Every structure is written in C-alpha cells, then in structure tokens.
Amino acid sequence: MSVQSTVSNWAVLTEQRLNELMPCEDNLQKEIFDACRYSLLAGGKRLRPALCMIFYHLCGGSADSAIDFASGIEMIHSYSLIHDDLPCMDDSDYRRGRLSCHRVYGYSTAMLAGDALLNRAFEIMSQPLSGVDPKCQMKALHTVATASGLYGMVGGQVIDLALEGKSCTEDQLWKMIELKTAVMIAGACESGCRLAGADEETAKAAYEYGRAIGLAFQIRDDVLDVTGDAALVGKPVGEDGESGKNTFVSMYGVEKCNELIAELTDKAIRCTEAFANGDELREIALWLTDRQY
C-alpha cells in the first residue's frame, strides 16, 4: 500500500469519526454547530491525526478508541484555521477551495466556532478511552495541550502577527514557524507514542521527526504560495507576499528553500531509525517534500 493510500485511509476514518463527534443539532445554538461542521468537515489531508495513529500503532497501541484522541487533534487544527482566516489575523476569504468560515457565518460566529472546536477537542481527548491506560492518555493530552498553546501554535501566531510588515531575522523566522506549525505536528507524533505507553527515548524520536517534517511542511507551503496552482492549493496564491508576511521564500528564495526542505527531510528520515518498522514514516517524509497542495 502506498503512503498516500495509508494517509488517505486514516483521513477517511478521521472524517467519519469527526462527523459523529460533531453532530448536527437543531437547537437555539444551531448556528454554532453548523459553523463548526462547515470548517471541520471541509476535507484536507488530516495529516496530524494520521501521524498520531501511525505512531500509536508503531508503539504497540491497538485500541480502536484512540481514533477519538486523534480526531481531537484535528479539531484543534481546524479551530486554528478558522481563527487564522479572520480579518484580525490573515484576513483570508478562502480555505480548502471554498469560502472561509467568517465569510459564511460572520466574524463573531466564526470566532466562537473556533473556541467551540478547541473546547470540544479537549472534551473528547480527556474522556475515558477504552483500552488506553489513563496515565498514558494524560501524558498524551499534556503533550497536545503544550503544543497548541503558549509554547506552541498560539505563541507562534503571536510572533507572526508581531512581525507582519516588518523585517525579521533568520532566528525569528525559524522560531515563529517552529512554534506556529512544527510543534503541533511534532506533538501529534509524540502523543501517539504517549498513548501507547512508549518510553522517553522513543517519544523524543517521534517529536524530532514531527518537528523536522513540520518545518519542511511550512517551507513547502511558502514555496507553493509562490509557485503553486490555486486550484490544487485550495486558496489564492501570492497572498503572503502581498500582505508583507515573513516567509522562507522572502528570506531565502525558492531554490534555497528547496535545499532546506531536503535537509529537513533527511533529518526526519534519520529519526525513523528509532522505530523497527519505520519505512512508512520515511515514505511520508518524502511524500510531503514533493507535494503540490
């Protein structure tokens, strides 16, 4: 089975579970359910939950209920996209090939939909998971909470906003992207190990793998914003340059960015040596390097 098929299969399972975990509700707050579902079920690679589940199984995990924890990670990712698109952030009108949440439901409802998805994620990830050791679950939960908060995704977004329209140093750019994008992907990888009760050395290898592909993932996004096909990317290209955002392309140029992606991919592949069956992880790293969307 190809790596694309593996990730696609996990995406399908995640999509099905997300549909169940975020139900339709015909009540006074119906609009917030609709807005959450609009963004949560809009498709996408579902990379973060796939990585969580792949590492979970690599480390010996077998509980079917672990998909709920992985789905919670995708809810956190979806909330961040809703907030990223808001006028006070990136001010993006399109996401995944269609109107962004605030363009359909309005600014206030979109902001609350993001809040609701974040809270729903932790409701789900903290509930008892059949077949998962509660102590392992708590470690995994702590990993995701840290990766998505002040020392991770939220912190990176703050740096991004503070530097917008200003020149930044290489160190500032790398720190921004590490926190905003890479740490959450790394956290998804590590959390799968934690759920399965893996040792510290294994969890660290998973984190470093995720950090490397996360950085490469964002650099690839920056390149696609310049060279990509809007129909494949799912949103207009060139927006980062027009808005004065600091990107790897603006710092290094496309050719150097491709070199950095190759270096980070090699680093990720070296991290897979900690896993007895790491072929799939190596293939994922290479696949992400060449993606066109």
Image: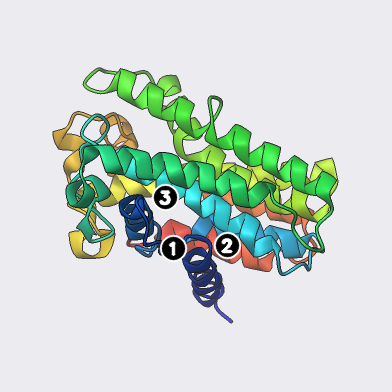
Quadrant containing the C terminus in the rendered view: bottom left
Neighbour class for label 2 at 10 Å: few (<14), some, many (≥20)?
many
Q: Nearer the viewer, mark 2 or mark 3?
A: 3
Neighbour class for label 3 at 10 Å: few (<14), some, many (≥20)?
many
Q: Nearer the viewer, mark 1 or mark 3?
A: 3
**Residue found farthest to the front:** 28
Which badge, 1 or 2, comes first in the chain's sequence? 1
- Give the quarter of the image for residue 98: bottom left
Which badge, 2 or 3, comes first in the chain's sequence? 2
Question: From where the camera sits, is residue 156 visible?
Answer: yes
* Residue at the (46%, 64%) spot, across then down: 23
Residues marked 1 and 2 touching at CB (< 8 Å): yes
Q: Residue 135: x, y in percent?
A: 84, 44
Residues marked 2 and 3 touching at CB (< 8 Å): no
Query: Which residue corresponds to mark 3?
Result: 78
Q: Residue 69: x, y in percent?
A: 64, 55
Q: Residue 75: x, y in percent?
A: 49, 51
* Residue at the (22%, 49%) spot, across then down: 105
Residue 45 is marked as: 1
**Residue found farthest to the left:** 242
Amino acid type, callout 1: Lys
Query: Which residue corresponds to mark 2?
Result: 50
Amino acid type, callout 3: Ser
Secondary structure category for the residue under label 2: helix
How far apart in space, not on screen, are marks 1 and 3 (Cα)? Answer: 12 Å
Neighbour class for label 1 at 10 Å: few (<14), some, many (≥20)?
some
